[in-house]
Image (cartoon, coloured by chain):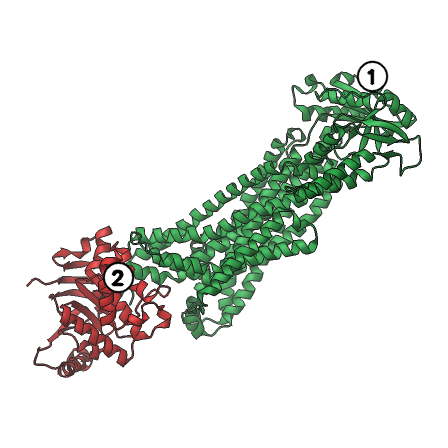
Chain colours: A green, B red
Amino acid sequence: MFYKLVFRNSRRERKENGLFFSSLLVAIVAFYIILSLPYQDVMRFLARMESDAVNRLLAMIPAFYGLTLCLMFFLIYYASRFQLERRRHEFGVYLMSGMRRIKLFALLLAEDFQNSVAALLLGLPIAVLLSELISLLTARLVGLGIIGHQSSFSLTAALETAAGFLLIKFAAFLILSGKISRQEIGTLLADQPEGVRPQKPWPVYAVALIGGIGCLAAAYTKAIRGLAWYHIMEMGRTLFLGTAGTFLLFWGLRLPLGLLARRKKSGRHLHVFHFRQLQETVISRSGALALGSLLLLAALCFFGAGVAISRFYGEAEHILDYTFVEEWGERSAEEIRQALQEQGLEEQFSHLFEVKVGYIRTTEDYEHAFEMKPVLEALDELQHSSDTSADSSEDSWRNGSSLQNHLRQYTYPHLIALSGYNELLAAAGLPELMLGEKEAALFQDAEFANEEDVELLNTILKTRPKAQLDGQEITLTGEVQTASIVTDRSITLALALILPDEAFDYYTQENYDIYLNGILAEEAYAHDGLMAAISSLNEKLDAAGLPYESYLQNMGRQLFYMVAASYITIYLAIIFLLIADTMIGVQFLTGQRKTGRRYRTLIWLGADYRMLRQSARKQINWYFGIPTGIAACSSLFGIRALLNGLLSSRVRSNMSEMMWISAAMIVALCMVEYLYLAAVKRISDRYLQGLMEPEREE
Amino acid sequence: MQPILKMESLKKHYGKGKNVTNALNGITFQVMPGEFLGIMGSSGSGKSTLLNCIATVIAPDSGSILMNGRQVQNLKGAALADYRGKEIGYLFQNFELLDNLTGRENILLPLSLHGVSEKESGRRLAQLARYLEVEEVLDKFPTQMSGGQKQRIAAARALILKPHILLMDEPTGALDSKNAKALMEKLSGLNEREASTILMVTHDSNAASYCNRILFIQDGVIFHEIRRDLPDETRQEFYARILEVLAQLGGGSANVL
């Protein structure tokens, strides 16, 4: 009998709380996917090349898992509390029938365990399949067909998922059932009224509403102007204003909802009823709704920022396929070239050219080897004029000032020989750089050069300013050069001078490094694709013992950033979204069941199913719409702030594009919200249909 | 004169096999326009089942219920909703007010359900609120009202659409004697003034003494019927007669075996 009861109750529980049960399934899937990340094809590939970074990321995964387990614990605790509250009367009846408290505890434990096992049995296979699919899909998307697919199934990940999930379920259960089984039978049997919340005069709510909007506006301003990143205190203030603003706004919302309820709408059925229902929920649960909205905001920010960042990393400019470095091995560039020829590998390249990079060797006065006072003075002037001009913006002032500081510290720049650099430009299909005898061009790696800075410098360079190189005057000319001089995108030069070859030889005293760059010929990769061609050439180069850096390794690095950013942010976004939506959904549905008597009264008064359904659906739209709307609005500012703070200056110039990507993501997530909304509506419809069935009330 | 409500051979049973309970076992009676009919009986006698059948909350197994000559069991969809809201008014023992709506909003709820404009019923609302003495609590929420006020608000809600018949299920069950008396006086006054038809199920002999006629039900059949001899018989005398019948019902020969 006991087991029959356990079986029946847990089945009923799953059926009645389908939404919560589905959320648990999604949580299990998310847990497994993040835990099986090391076994994904992309990660296996990356681990071969970037083992340090990958290991560091993988070491962080247990921390992420722990954090999300804690968050899920709160969701499970919250949702289970509502469910157990609903069954108080039933527990009272069990106890009245002579069931011992320990047996009631065992009954609840067995029910909970059965449900958890059901969720795991259903969730884990889905998780394994999905993880496999993601592994295949990401490998294909990033063009890693060459690495060969291996199953991403991990028993450890499955066991860890099960253990973590059961642990939080058990912990939540222990606390809740302890509370319930300690209560008096009389208390359990009696209906627990919601309790009337004391109403405050309307001006109090009006002040809260206006205060909330004010706080949010202040937080938005701080976020969008990038002020939040100035100092930790400023960031704290922004977060505090945003959080307090959201809570105040939700607390004050009862005023406009009350006004909406009072607005006379004679043509609409149950207009007053559904606004009063909404108002009541907002009154009793404004805090939970505000929290839900903040979680949605976090999900939207993570998702939007994650996708925008990953898009940037995927878009790194690519000219060179190979760089052979003389200093890495004992062989000189000429020897490497010869070795390539001997191995018959030279014809694989369409371009094979040397880029020479060196230091100023004619002086040891590192503090004054290079000075460009006219450039700094011109920047000073620009800064001064933007200080006084009416339309000066804080941003341009900051740009001018930071660029000046940046340029001032480079008194001993790298030198690049013009001939090699021009070959690089030719390979990239760019026009050649022409320099006279006493002329030089400024080089800044793309990583350090944002569009505004480059524009500013180009304006100054047009005036052909003079500079001093080891006491000799040279003219800076042309535009700022930014093409990468080697394959490895992690090797960057913050500032360098491009000099004609003779001048380069003189200043470096012919003591320089040679980077032998190669670009694969189209025929070499036309058949299998670039990645496969590089991969097979790498094997041959390894066999020949040649030191090299290939685009594949470089891409691996970029891919690592992309995968790390997108996996973790999207994982967190899903978890936050799940918690927020389940919280709001479960809250609405339990509230609806708690006020089921009202719906019955409406039926007695002549309401038909269509009217009730319409009213409940409207309530659901508002109930989800308010927190989602506020979160979506805040996320536009939040994502901008995140991108402002996290991205390098070069990428910031693509801000508007990234904001569009983020906006698209927000729309995508709002569609997920819509799906959730539809699920909640279906459950609500089913419940109302059940109420329409006559029942004996004697 | 045509009866407003006619029940014929109404049967309803609950349970299966050996556990069958015949809640209604072929009940037949009529309610005439302007009549204040009471139905009394012990717990489980079938009186609430009867009321619920008329209110279409449960369907009878056999027999017919005719409201103004129209078969109630055949009503579906909009016609059924209209019947529930416009042809009958229902007053519950526990008031069943929506506690998140003000008194006024509760009373006007049937209007919004049946698409009646508030302007039309504004006068009716004012009239009812004055008559039932609930004007001062119209803008209060049920939690801010006394039991009597709640039941009078519920009565106003049941009457706002001028139903053909008012069904009352133990309307005084949750009230103290003072509030119960006040409510019954108001309802009986309404019956006299507006010739409203009322069908009341009750245990309370005092409340029943306001009726014109009382049907006593036992084991799903009408066991006895008494009629107040108006205008000669006073309410106190009618009350004494009710007690007599109840004494017979509770301790008479019918229950000895």
Q: Left or right: where does residue A524 sit relative to residue B238?
A: right
Check the image and report above or below for A481 versus B80.
above
Residue A529: where, in percent of width, then height? Answer: 65, 23
Callout 1 and callout 2 share a chain: no
Q: Left or right: where does residue A254 sit relative to residue B3?
A: right
User: Is disc 1 in contact with disc 2, using a CB cutoff of under 8 Å?
Assistant: no
Quarter of the image with the C terminus of chain A in it: bottom left
Q: Left or right: where does residue A634 sit relative to residue A389?
A: left
Dividing the picture into quadrants, the one containing residue B133 is: bottom left
Dividing the picture into quadrants, the one containing residue A242 is: bottom right
Please say whether residue A606 is visible from this viewpoint: no
Residue in the foreground of this view, choosing between A682 and A367:
A367
**Tag in front: 1 or 2:** 1
Residue A432: where, in percent of width, then height? Answer: 75, 20
Please say whether residue A436 is visible from this viewpoint: yes
Residue in the foreground of this view, choosing between A147 and A246:
A246
Dividing the picture into quadrants, the one containing residue A489 is: top right
Residue bearing mark 2:
B17
| Amino acid residing under circle 1 | Glu
Residue in the foreground of this view, choosing between A204 and A599:
A204
At x 53%, y 39%, the residue is A664
Label 1 crowd bin: few (<14), some (14–19), many (20+), radius 10 Å:
few
Residue bearing mark 1:
A342
Gap in angstroms between the C-alphas marked 1 and 2: 99 Å
Query: Please, which chain is the residue tagged with disc 1 on?
Result: A
